[in-house]
Image (cartoon, helix red, strand yellow):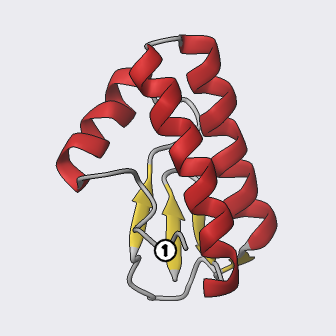
Amino acid sequence: MIMRVMGEGQFEVGEDHLNHLNQLDDELLKALDSGDEAKFREAYGRLLDAVRRLGTRVPDDSLEPSDLILPDAEASLDEVRQLLLSEGEGIIPGFAE
């Protein structure tokens, strides 16, 4: 799966990591539901860090379509919440077991 982090580029993440990312996505949903900015920042930071760590950077000159687009690290709680409302449940597609 190709994931784009706005302002950073694309990362190819293997399906073997999607369950872990989905767990982090669930934590993000809980933080968004609480409305707590600090919890949101922590949860979203963990999700973005995992994408960067587990994914392989796609060269900038590659024309791969993104399967998923994540807002940049500075996105507000409301911006991420709006993304979730437009996408359905969570940011990461449902790959949980």
What's under tag 1, amino acid-wise? Phe
> Residue sitting at 64 percent across and 49 percent down?
47
Q: Nearer the viewer, residue 34 or 45?
A: 34
Task: From the top left corner, tell me how far across and down residue 54 is, in percent.
Answer: 77, 70
On the image, which quarter does residue 9 sit in? bottom right
Q: Mark 1, residues whose alpha carbon is within 10 Å: few (<14), some, or many (≥20)? A: some
Residue furthest to the left in view is: 86
Residue furthest out toward the front: 97
Q: Quadrant of the C terminus?
A: bottom right
Residue 56 vs residue 6: left or right?
A: right
Q: Residue at x 41, y 68 (%)?
A: 94
* Residue 50 image position (x, y, % from top left): 74, 57
Image height check: is 93 above or below 67? above
Q: Nearer the viewer, residue 16 or 45?
A: 16
Provide the residue designation for mark 1: 95
- Residue 16 location (% of width, % of height): 69, 84
State the residue in front, 60 or 65: 65
Question: Residue at the location (25% across, 35% down)?
Answer: 82
As drawn, the residue found furthest toward the right would be: 53
Q: In terms of secondary structure, where does tag 1 sit? A: loop
Q: Residue 4, position in %: x, y?
A: 50, 65
Asked if 35 appears above or below 7 in the picture, the reply is above
Q: How many numbered tags mark residues here?
A: 1
